[in-house]
Image: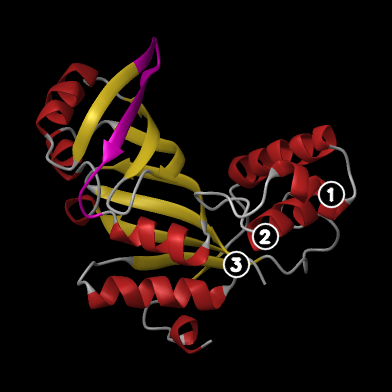
Amino acid sequence: MSTIAQLGIPAEEFALRETLSRVPDVTVEAERVVAHDDERVMPFVWAAGEDLAAFEDALAEDSSVENERRLTDLPDGRFYQMEWVESVEVLLHSMTEHGAAVLKARGQDGRWHLRILFSDRAAVSQTHAFCRERDVAADVEQIHDLDGRDGGGQHGLTAEQYEAVTTALETGYYEVPRGSSARDLAADLDISHQALSERLRRGHGNLVANALTVDAVREGDDELATE
């Protein structure tokens, strides 16, 4: 059963640790996070705030970042491409070992909140254990199973979108490199390539825009570790 989990990680133990500490008023959101190799991930990052000049100065000196490049400069923020090269083991483990997909990563005031789509709760538990073994203070802030019990539309997804997204996850479509192609996935679902593209795009949009309705994990609850 596919599961959405939100992990909270201190920036000092993750990416942009020096930058977010120096400019706490700037908010960053990472998009299209992919594994670049066995030691780094390559996200596109949107930064918004009043002091983006200070943000860029800090970014240039941040040891957890390499090859940063501003792509777009708009009135309400700036868009960058960069590589995260240190302390991103939790993402690499989730993406390479469990085929997880990063739906959203938001950093502000020294902390990251990562919303990740896992194949099941066991993968969440294994990722959480992986963090504990490496003394990474990752908290499971929210978790929700995509079981369809909300009656019809699964957490903002239509039945068709839900089927496309979960099938894509199960067949390795989100892995890097991909375990299945868009053509293979369309054939599995018996739909056209165009229909698949529209279902995935709209499904991803609904997942992010609606942010899902998730169940908070209570402090001290060991249900996650035992399931």
Label 1, secondary structure: give it: helix
Disc marking residue 187: 1
User: How many numbered marks does the figure carry?
Assistant: 3
Task: Tell me the kind of residue under disc 1.
Answer: Ala
Task: Tell me the kind of residue under disc 3.
Answer: Ser
Q: Nearer the viewer, mark 1 or mark 3?
A: 1
- Spatial separation of the CA atoms under disc 1 and disc 2: 12 Å
Label 2, secondary structure: give it: loop
* Image quarter of residue 89: bottom left
**Residue marked by disc 3:** 119
- Spatial separation of the CA atoms under disc 1 and disc 3: 21 Å
How many neighbours does mark 2 have within 10 angstroms: few (below 14), some (14-19), or many (20 or more)? some
Q: Residue at x 20, y 37 (%)?
A: 65
- State whether residue 212 is above or below residue 18: below
Q: Quick one: label 1 or label 3, which is nearer the N terminus?
A: 3
- Residue 178 lies in the magenta stretch: no
Left or right for 25, reference 183: left
Left or right for 138, reference 118: left
In which quadrant is the C terminus drawn?
bottom right
Residue 51 at what x, y percent from top left?
21, 20
Q: Residue at x 73, y 58 (%)?
A: 167
Q: Residue at x 81, y 46 (%)?
A: 186
Residue 170 at what x, y percent from top left?
66, 63
Q: Nearer the viewer, mark 3 or mark 2?
A: 2
In which quadrant is the N terminus drawn?
bottom right
**Residue marked by disc 2:** 171
Which span is picked out in magenta?
Answer: 71-87
- State whether residue 78 is above or below residue 11: above
How many neighbours does mark 3 have within 10 angstroms: few (below 14), some (14-19), or many (20 or more)? many
Specify whether residue 164 is in view. Answer: yes
How many neighbours does mark 1 have within 10 angstroms: few (below 14), some (14-19), or many (20 or more)? few
